[in-house]
Image (cartoon, rainbow, N blue to C red):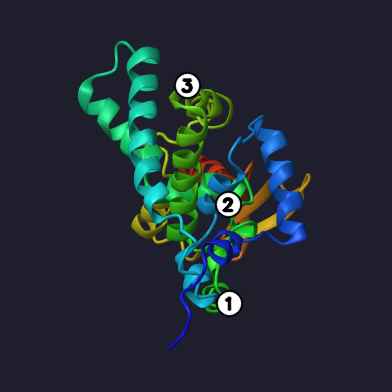
Amino acid sequence: MPKPTSSKNQSREKAVFTTRQHELMQSILRELQVSFADEQLLRQAFTHSSYVNEHRMKHVKDNERLEFLGDAVLELAVSNHLFREFPSMTEGDMTKLRAAMVCEASLASLAEELQFGNVVLMGKGEEMTGGRTRPALLADVFESFVGAMYLDQGLSNVEQFLERFVFPKLDEGAFSVTADYKSQLQEFVQKENLGVISYEITDEQGPAHNREFSSAVSVNETRVGTGRGRSKKEAEQRAAQATLEQLQRRE
């Protein structure tokens, strides 16, 4: 008859960052001006279920519950910010803007900018199938990070983090419900029968946790517009905006 797992063995079982992941995480936290009192909670935020399942860790928690909590905390913090900072905005417009800020695409872009994908603990199968760049996984990790921060430091510190890193992007139009320039460009090109659109990341600058990307848009292999951003998606959106404006002037 097998012996039951001792409490001592259970306490030793934990998710572990690689040396490179640990160094990158510390760099990210310094950049964000965030520190965790409970490092185990931080590790949990970046532990995907595939890692737990692959290593058969019965006593290690994945980040799914933190993701659930972070989703609610984000909605509250974003709602509070919009209510305070935009006193003339209607309820309907606040609802649309909040939805744009907390949608999967926006959260995945934020996580990508922070290099969260490189820090996630995941199973080899998940990694081999592109888990580190999967938008749904990245969005979930951003929510779990917020959930962990809320438990570790409270709502006030979460709001300070969002004030420094997320809310300034409102002024850049990153979350505007009318700022999906890639879709607008696609519709315009199809309507005018101008040809095929292609995007290319032409340059990357800055350290790993603070990248700036350049993107170029071509129509029928002719470059039309360029743009820069803190993520590939933001750079592509700005390049699409520049291209759309160019084409509209020509037409």
Quarter of the figure that contains the N terminus: bottom left
Q: Nearer the viewer, residue 81 or 96?
A: 81
**Image vertical order of residue 177 relative to residue 164, above or below:** below
Label 3 crowd (10 A; few <14 / some 14-19 / many >=20): few
For disc 1, the marked residue is 124
For disc 3, the marked residue is 156
**Image vertical order of residue 245 relative to residue 203, above or below:** above
For the residue marked with disc 2, what is the amino acid? Answer: Arg
Q: Earlier in the sequence, mark 1 or mark 3?
A: 1
Residue under the image location 71 percent in, 56 percent down: 21
Q: Is residue 210 visible?
A: no
Outermost residue toward the bottom in this view? 1
Q: Is residue 25 visible?
A: yes
Q: Position of residue 201 (x, y in %)?
A: 66, 57
Q: Is label 1 in a helix, a strand or a loop?
A: helix
Q: Nearer the viewer, residue 134 or 147?
A: 147
Residue under the image location 31 percent in, 38 percent down: 99
Q: Is label 2 in a helix, a strand or a loop?
A: helix
Q: Is label 3 in a helix, a strand or a loop?
A: helix
Q: CA distance from mark 1 to mark 3?
A: 37 Å
Q: CA distance from mark 2 to mark 3?
A: 21 Å
Q: CA distance from mark 1 to mark 2?
A: 18 Å
Residue 12 occupies quadrant: bottom right
Q: Position of residue 206 (x, y in %)?
A: 78, 44
For the residue marked with disc 3, what is the amino acid? Answer: Ser
For disc 2, the marked residue is 43
Residue under the image location 50 percent in, 70 percent down: 57
Q: Position of residue 132 (x, y in %)?
A: 57, 64
Label 2 crowd (10 A; few <14 / some 14-19 / many >=20): many
The circle drawn on residue 89 is none
